[in-house]
Amino acid sequence: MSAYKSDFLNVLAERGFIHQMSEPEALDARAKAGKITAYIGFDCTAASLHVGSLLPIMMLYWLQQTGHRPIALMGGGTTRVGDPSGKDESRRILTDAMIEQNLAGIRAIFSKFLKFEGAGGNAIMANNADWLNKLNYIDFLRDVGKHFSVNRMLAFDSVKMRLERQQELSFLEFNYMVLQAYDFVELNKRTGCILQMGGSDQWGNIVSGIDLGRRMTNAQLFALTSPLITTSSGAKMGKTAAGAVWLDANLVSPYDYWQYWRNTEDGDVARFLKLFTILPLDEIARLGALQGQDLNEAKKVLATEATALVHGRAAANEASETSRKTFEEGLFAGALPTVEIARAELERGIGVLTAFAEKTGLVSSNGDARRQVKAGGLKVNDVAVSGEKMMLTPKDLTTDGVIKLSLGRKKHVLLKPV
RNA sequence: GGGAGAGUGUCCCGAGCGGCAAAGGGGGCGGACUGUAAAUCCGCUGGCUACGCCUUCGUAGGUUCGAGUCCUACCUCUCCCA
């Protein structure tokens, strides 16, 4: 089974994190011989990270677990430029204050996976704005720019595609690759980092960094990319109707997060268990072998384990229990998302449309609520709403003192008078 | 610099003789079937104090009873010539 000599590469390979590597043997030897430092770059355009960032985070996690040093690099500087391999819409420029704020939120997430300080803590969080913002253009051109061959840059897929399709490629974007390459070299100088990881779309950028390192400092650098993760039916991960699946409990509750994983497609369960939980592989093999309805057990394990990593074991168990009561027993469960309303307002009576649209946000507007009533998609205390004129009053309170509102079979919110 | 096109429902792609809340997809949501899955089928997919009212087709004006549609200027993008 052990294709590699180092624990690090073995773990990543067995769990399905590896798509491409540069010089696998040499990297394997370095990882076997001693502690290596590796980094992954992250966007800091938002105040939180979402499920799409989970894969790289897990790579850093395993890096640290196998005895090495991870660096999470925030793209405070490169975010301003925009990667041409992505979309062509230029990114917003964030103020330093906003970036600082975002960094704080993101750091909180990283600290659940990586140990930055204390015993066994050696992870580093860096921001490339620290060095990119200070660059002097002429110096940069002379020191770094001279190592880049435009002829070669034009041959990179990300650039070539744009040119072939005769799509606009601004000079700004063209420089993204140069800056990212420079990041790698800078991190190598500062911390001895020798490996950059990232998604498979980053391969070209990473290799540019390796090249630049060889030319500028004669350093031997490495690349490791992960496959692009999509669901079995081909959709990108991390998007739901409500938007991105954030890792921040204030944006997506642990219960909703648990539900996201619980609804994984059959064909993805084993793969996701390997990528997004830290369960031992033999346990995953057992769960992945389940068939048909039994596979639901594996999905619950996936949901609980994945939630525990981000929100903690207690929150994961609570989400699991709430889900069990809600779906398997059809009962109320206190941990469902709860919206508080004024008791006096309830005594006056609240229209169902208002309750669903304004109070809970389960539907986006009164019009939407009306449509859902017609479609039979709204329920109050598990009874379908019969007409849009219906009023909610204290009579609708259950013995638990709440009113349960449901959209479809899966989305539930409790109204609680205070 | 000259010439030719394009910009449509705030998720995307895309039709649109001057009567348009605007065809058709995709996506999404709801329903049926199931296993809280997938596939399939059905319905819905601007807002509101709702048999009516308001806001939508790059921006700003104009023609007209009436403009997504015609005219003018401007913005952005693409192509061709220089």
Image: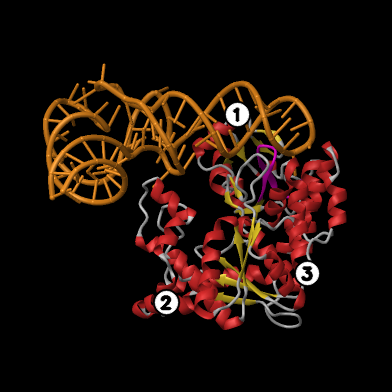
Q: Which residue is mark 1?
A: A375
**Element marked by disc 1:** helix
**Labels 3 and 2 positioned on one and the same chain:** yes
In space, the residues marked 3 and 2 are separated at their CA atoms by 37 Å
Q: Is residue A340 magenta?
A: no
The image quadrant where one finds the N terminus of chain A is bottom right
Q: Is residue A413 magenta?
A: yes
- Position of residue A123 relative to residue B67, above or below, is below
In space, the residues marked 1 and 2 are separated at their CA atoms by 55 Å
What's the mark number on residue A133?
Answer: 2
Determine contact: label 3, label 2, CB under 8 Å.
Answer: no
Q: Is the residue marked by circle 3 packed among few (<14), some (14-19), or many (20+) residues within 10 Å?
A: some
For the point 44% across and 64% down, the residue is A176
Is residue A207 toward the left or the right of residue A114 in the image?
Answer: left
Amino acid on which the number 2 mark rests in the picture? Asn
The image quadrant where one finds the C terminus of chain A is bottom right
- Quadrant of res A398: top right
**Element marked by disc 2:** loop
Give the magenta-colored segment's residue range.
Answer: A399-415
